[in-house]
Amino acid sequence: MTVTKIYKFTDIDCPNCAAKAEAKIKKIKGVQDVAIAFFAQKVFITAEESDFAEIYPAAVKAVQAVEADCELIELK
Amino acid sequence: MKLSRSQKRKLYEILGAAALLIAAVILSAILKPTWWAAILLYLPAFVLAGHETITSALRNILRGQVFDEHFLMSVASIAAMILGEHAEAVGVLLFGALGELFESYAISSARRSVKALAKLCPDTVRVVSPDGNTSEIAAETAEAGTVFLVAAGERIPLDGIILEGEAALDCAALTGESLPVEVEAGHEVAAGAINLSGLLKIRALRPAKESGAARIIAMVEDASAKKARSEAFITKFARYYTPIVVGAALLLAIVPPLIFGGFTDWLYRALNFLVISCPCALVISVPLTFFGTIGGSARRGILFKDNYAIENLSAAKIAAFDKTGTLTEGHLSIDQIRPVSCTPNELIAYAAAAEYGSTHPIAKTVLEAFEGIGGVIGGVAEQLSQSTELRGRGRTCSLGGVIIAAGNRKLLEEMGVQIPSTEENTTVIYVSVDGQYRGSITFSDRIKADSAEAIGKLRNVGVGTVMLSGDNRNGAEKVAAQLGISRFGWGLLPEEKVTALESYRPEGGKLIFVGDGINDAPSLAATDVGIAMGGIGSDAAIEAADVVLPGDNPLKVAEAVRISKKAMAIAKQNIVFAIGIKVLFLILSAFGLTNMWMSVFADVGVSVLAILNAMRTLK
């Protein structure tokens, strides 16, 4: 089933960096869509539910490549 | 002005670096130091102003990201230091850091303004248990059905229905309406409203996270995930702009010296390029404009679903209003009861039986009238069977074997019932019982007090108004004439409204649709901007709408258009201003007409002005 999960991110302080992180997440295998709400500090990732086990660590790596201290916390 | 701890630390560093820079400038004027001594003299200021910029540049290079603004500033300032332009080298870092501090302040204050919305609902609920004891529980643990108290001066924590008490409510935070609303037992109230007087006992209708206020917060927070065209343009622009300027800087440093000589002079001009090359002003100010607009207008009872809604609404040409519930109150009252061979009360009872189970405003009014004459709806419902809705015509049912029909002329004629000719100048239903005509009931719907002014205000912002209605021609014409609307469609079923809307689509502008969110999801979705007005209860309407007005004041439509126009104007000003100044300085630097001080002022100055301009939207 395709789902959109929402993650809160921390420490990304410029919209340009957020755009870079978005582009990196988009390249992760299995990600169908991604959107970063920079001001709301949220990342929306759409993918098959079963793929998230692999996508989440890859997404964390992607955002940390842009901002080393960045964390991704899933919102319920 | 509220600064976070890290922002304060940065501010102190900048002030300290500025003091060290001034000291170094004075000392070097007195001591006339050698090249090496001068570097040592300026080094403390250089390190304090630039340590974050330079370490972040180094870290990004290790990760394979070369062309970021920190890298460019580092290269420019280190090279300036080597060229002997010490004060300018420190200046670039100093003003760069100041610009970043200002950006981060702007971002956090924009985020704060939206977070303030999240305080709409209290965290605790004062629950009344069946034995009458009260206790406080966390709002998120309260379930539907919980009975709770709200005293005067408190905010309502959950959507609910009033069991006891009466009060005036301030719903400004939800609807933008400043006038208090009088409520009493039986009324529905929304979380986030402030109880101005009296004690209310309320039964929760849904848990806290499903309340209207929670939806507002989620909508506003998530709105910025979708980028408008102008924002996408900026991202693309930034992607090409920086490498192009850096390439041009390289060429400027290498090619002219080979022809004209004077290597340091050209290198200095190239460094100016690097200083101006940061697209920060654009990259931050445009999204900030949209975010500020979404946050600022939410407090006035206008919720934009995304940036596209702002962009499209700013180009609105025609506003199509669904008559009932937007221009009119949407609460029908019975005008006339004209029974034929029965009493008025019997006619109401027949109509109530037919209308039972319908969500149409007519049904609501008829059933209320039935209760008003002492009828018991539950008693009627027990004997009902075969309740059927015939879309666009009316309803039929069987009441203990008797076939009742209530609806328009078409419905009764299809059933072979003769209707004596009557003038249809209002909303009307005809009633037949077992094929015999039993009379008609006419309804009227009051035009909202602000409707005429709203249409005038829309005209002032360049938007024409048309009206759609499911009513008969005379009913629609009457309202249109009173409001001065010359183009209107009548007798339309919800799905026909979509086709009718297309015929109003303007050339070279956007078509907006304003509906009350009941049964008009197709129209909301079919137009460029769908505006759902009055209440945020219907999921389908919120899903389909681009703008939600929790209040029911039509003036908000014109205000939304005005706000979106202002937002787009600010975004465009920033784009033109920032690109214009940067291009101007690039040309000036290429001819050696600027120095690094001017470049850094141009870069940081443009950022600060663009951000200040964008922050106007937060007000």
Image (tube, coloured by chain):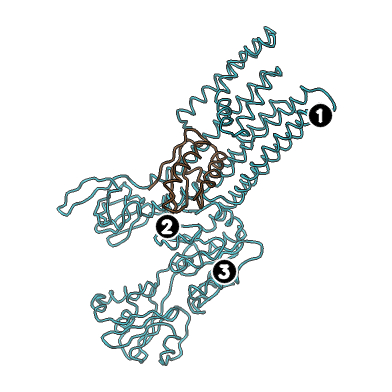
Chain colours: A brown, B cyan
Judging depth in this view, the residue of B261 and B616 nearest the camera is B261
Q: How many marks?
A: 3
* Label 2 environment density (alpha carbons within 10 Å; few <14, some 14–19, many ≥20): few
Q: Which residue is mark 3?
A: B466
Circles 2 and 1, Cβ within 8 Å, touching? The answer is: no
Q: Which residue is mark 2?
A: A1
Q: Amino acid at mark 3?
A: Val
Q: Nearer the viewer, residue B497 or B258?
A: B258
- What amino acid does circle 2 point to? Met
Q: Residue furthest top?
A: B31
Secondary structure of the residue carrying numbered label 2: loop
According to the picture, the residue beneath numbered tag 1 turns out to be B256
Residue A1, image x, y percentages: 42, 57
- Determine whether, in the image, residue B366 is placed left or right of residue B320: left
User: Is B600 left, or right, of B148 in this rendering?
Assistant: right
**Does the residue at mark 2 contact the one at mark 3 (Cβ under 8 Å)?**
no
Residue B224 visible (yes or no): no
Q: Chain of mark 3?
A: B
> Is disc 3 placed on a helix, strand or loop?
strand
Kindly identify the residue that appears in the image at 41 percent across and 58 percent down. B536
Q: Nearer the viewer, residue B242 or A24?
A: A24
B480 lies left or right of B417? right
Compared with B563, B537 (above or below) is below
Whole-angstrom CA distance, mark 3 to mark 1, is 64 Å
Alpha carbon separation for disc pair 2 and 1 = 60 Å
